[in-house]
Amino acid sequence: MVKQVAKGGFVVTTSDITPNAREYAEGLNIELINGNELIEMWISVLQEEVKESWEVIPKEAY
């Protein structure tokens, strides 16, 4: 992020974020996403895709 002169960024892990990492990222416009949050985001997207697929099927079909 520093090399690219980014105004912010994301750090994603399938595990958890340590307290030191949270403290470091505080105020740096870095969003920390742990494993549980990642799974919740993934499920949310999948649910939305299913919902959208049902919306295109005419009601008479089900």
Image (cartoon, rainbow, N blue to C red):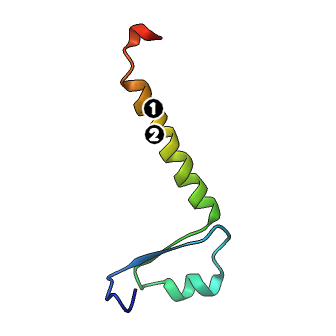
| Image height of 32 relative to 49, above or below | below
Q: Which part of the image, by quadrant, shows the N terminus? A: bottom left
Q: Amino acid at mark 2?
A: Glu
Q: Residue at x 51, y 46 (%)?
A: 44
**Pick the front one: 56 or 20:** 56
**Pick the front one: 6 or 32:** 6
| Image height of 21 relative to 35, above or below | below
Q: Residue at x 45, y 39 (%)?
A: 48
Q: Amino acid at mark 1?
A: Lys
Q: Residue at x 37, y 92 (%)?
A: 3
| Image height of 51 relative to 33, above or below | above
Q: Residue at x 50, y 84 (%)?
A: 25
Is the C-beta separation of discs 1 and 2 under 8 Å?
yes
Q: Position of residue 54 (x, y in %)?
A: 43, 25
Circle 1 sits in a helix, a strand or a loop, which is it?
Answer: helix
Most distant residue in the bottom direction: 3
Q: Which image quadrant for residue 23?
A: bottom right
Mark 1, Cα crowd under 10 Å, few <14 / some 14-19 / many 20+, is few
Most distant residue in the top direction: 60
| Image height of 1 relative to 46, above or below | below
Task: Report which residue position mark 1 lands on.
Answer: 51
Circle 2 sits in a helix, a strand or a loop, which is it?
Answer: helix
Between marks 1 and 2, how big is the CA–CA gap?
5 Å
Q: Position of residue 16 (x, y in %)?
A: 66, 72
Q: How many marks?
A: 2
Task: Report which residue position mark 2 lands on.
Answer: 48
